[in-house]
Amino acid sequence: MLSLKQQIRDELKNTDFPNLKFFYTKEALLCAPEILQELLEEEKQDFAIKLATPDTEITYELFEEFSELGYYFSILGHYQGVNNDEQIRKIIEDFEPEYIDFGNEISYSKRYFEMVKIVRNGTDLSQEQIKILDQEIESYEVRGIALDQTKQEILKKINKDLSELSQKFSNNALDSQNEFEYIITDESIISEVPDDDKAVAQKNAENKKVAGYLFDASGSSYGTIMKYCSDSSVRKHFYESRNSFATTGKYNNNPIILEILKLREQKAVLLGFKNYSELSLHFKMAESPEQVKNLFGEIAEQARPKAILELQEIREYFNLKELDIWDLGYYANKLKQEKYTFDSRELKKYFVYENVLAGLFETTQRLYNIEMKKTDIVSYSEDVEIYEVYRNGTFLSYYFTDFFYTPLKRQGAWADLLREKHGAYKKIVLNTCNFQKGTDGVTLLTLSDVETLYHEFGHAIHEMLSISEHSELSGFHVEHDFVELPSQLLENWARDEVGMKLFAKHFENGDEIPKAMLEKLKILEMFGNAQMILAQNTYAMLDMSLHSEGIPTSEAELDARVRKNAEQNSIFPVSDTYSPHTTFTHIFDGGYAAGYYSYMWAEIIEKEVWQAFKSSGDVFSPEIATKFHDLMLSAGSTKKASELFQDFFGREVSIDAFLKEKGLV
């Protein structure tokens, strides 16, 4: 009988969908440290052999090996994302420094760099291979291959330290948020809360053996309180708590942020850049921090007057002297109910999870001929669903979902690549969300949840539809300020009347969503857009400021910088406890450092594409969908993003469509 360790090694060679349930058993995880070490030693030996290859025998194929270590670490990394308990956390934390050391060894190997250049100077190469090699050469040069060994050693240590600090930051943010609980026993202040959300809170309280309703820091719980709780003091408590997690005690992320910023700046300067923003933007569409600041400043100036007018409308309608930021969601929702007779609680009744998912799949089938075939594969959770994805009868990828909230899951929603396509290995793409599961077998989503589901699947299809045989040129490898285009574009079909009719059916009787409700939703679609733009701009400018305008030298200075940025970009007063940076995982542990602006940047491009669909008179226009698929979506990163846009539109990007769609002109 095979040992457990050998069974795990054998399962890693399964080219179909892996047995994740097996990988994530406590017994299998106990073997993980030893297996990681074995795989690392094997890759080190393979790398040494590769470096010894005579120049005359170096071919492109030498660089195309499948990394079993990378695949296994990806499997473990996914589990940490959805179940960050002590066991998996320790496995990752103990091994990652060694893994980074090996990555540094490759990244600063002059012999390996020379080998890449030898292949690039060869003649028997495809255009895609040339692009990959050129990108690799540029990456080597940017990260300092020409620097002396002393400076390279400093860079290696910085890379290792940054990885460890980011891991600590993320763990602190999650642990701090998980300690937050709020019990409500006065039912009168939650009388407006939808019944299904109230049932979840009641069940949470029962599970903790306390009376009343228990709300936590999850996105769905927080959103429910801010939108439906009638007590302003409770809303204030939630808002101030959410914006001050991980600021004190054992979870204090402020010292970690200061160290991360210092090391990033030091790294950028060593590599010849003025600051970390310039280093980050080197591989993006945006040309400079100033370009981003100027563009976003222009958009903010367009949004500010409308945001002020909307606040004035709320204050006047409810005869409010002041409107605090924690009251905005509640009164905006009340205004829609009372003045415009639109009730988001009624809307939610038409968004049954299973129907929405079916509608999403039908949308992408009509647009891009994608066929989703659900499998009966059993995985690590009963909520995980696994699909085979086809286009025009050709297998593209496995796709799996983990959509429902659990306490140890990372906050938010994301798409990821569990395994690249390589030889017989089939591609595996995943989506993870934090929707609140219903207590009675029926899960109703909010409109925001629906948009999130469409958004993340937009990322997934960007990767799955990539036509290149080389993973380096797939959808996930486009410039970071372009990567949000397919995801944000797909959200439009979640809001559009034609798209919504594919899934919006009442949970009790199956009736279609009434036309009158859709018309009101369309009228109110623009309401709040200006405020959302200002809020997003606040985060984007904070990110850019911290990475381009000098490094704070103390926690007090850091706090002051954060609050000054909010004062400059928000239309609300900023409290002394406002500290959203301590849980800003996007920029301190999520790959968006000096890149959070990418969401709005990509949305500007996305609105251009959406306008093309709308202008055709059919949001499912086969002609526009085929053109978008062929020229932008499936192209991945085979061309620069600016070239993909030019291929589709034949011109430069304009902000006109964005301003129009947001109701700012």
Image (cartoon, rainbow, N blue to C red):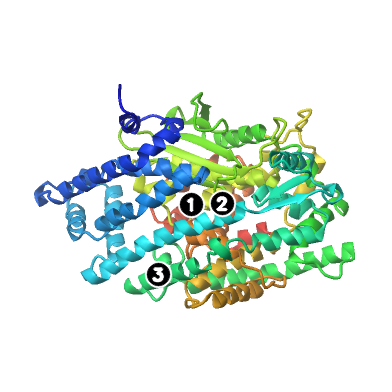
Who's the residue at 32% across and 71% down the image? 271
Q: How far is the residue under mark 2 from the one under mark 1?
A: 9 Å
Q: Position of residue 134 (x, y in %)?
A: 28, 57
Q: Residues within 10 Å of mark 2 (few under 14, many from 20)?
A: many
Q: Which residue is mark 3?
A: 263
Q: Nearer the viewer, mark 1 or mark 3?
A: 3
Q: How far is the residue under mark 1 from the one under mark 3?
A: 40 Å
Helix, strand or loop at mark 2? helix
Question: Is residue 636 in view from this perspective?
Answer: no
Helix, strand or loop at mark 3? helix
Say if 226 sits above or below 14 in the image. below
Disc number placed over residue 609 in the picture, else none: 2
Q: Quadrant of residue 16?
A: top left
Q: Position of residue 506 (x, y in %)?
A: 76, 33
Q: Which residue is mark 1?
A: 648
Answer with mark 1 or mark 3, whichever residue precedes in sequence: 3
Q: Nearer the viewer, mark 3 or mark 2?
A: 3
- Quarter the C terminus occupies: bottom right
Q: How far is the residue under mark 3 from the one under mark 2?
A: 39 Å
376 on left or right of 138: right
Helix, strand or loop at mark 1? helix
- Marks 2/1 in contact by CB < 8 Å: the verdict is yes
Answer with mark 3 or mark 2, whichever residue precedes in sequence: 3
Residue type beneath disc 3? Leu
Residue type beneath disc 2? Val
Say if 274 sits above or below 511 in the image. below
Q: Nearer the viewer, residue 494 or 350?
A: 350
Q: Position of residue 539 (x, y in %)?
A: 58, 65
- Quarter the N terminus occupies: top left
229 on left or right of 617: right
609 on left or right of 158: right
Q: Residues within 10 Å of mark 1 (few under 14, many from 20)?
A: some
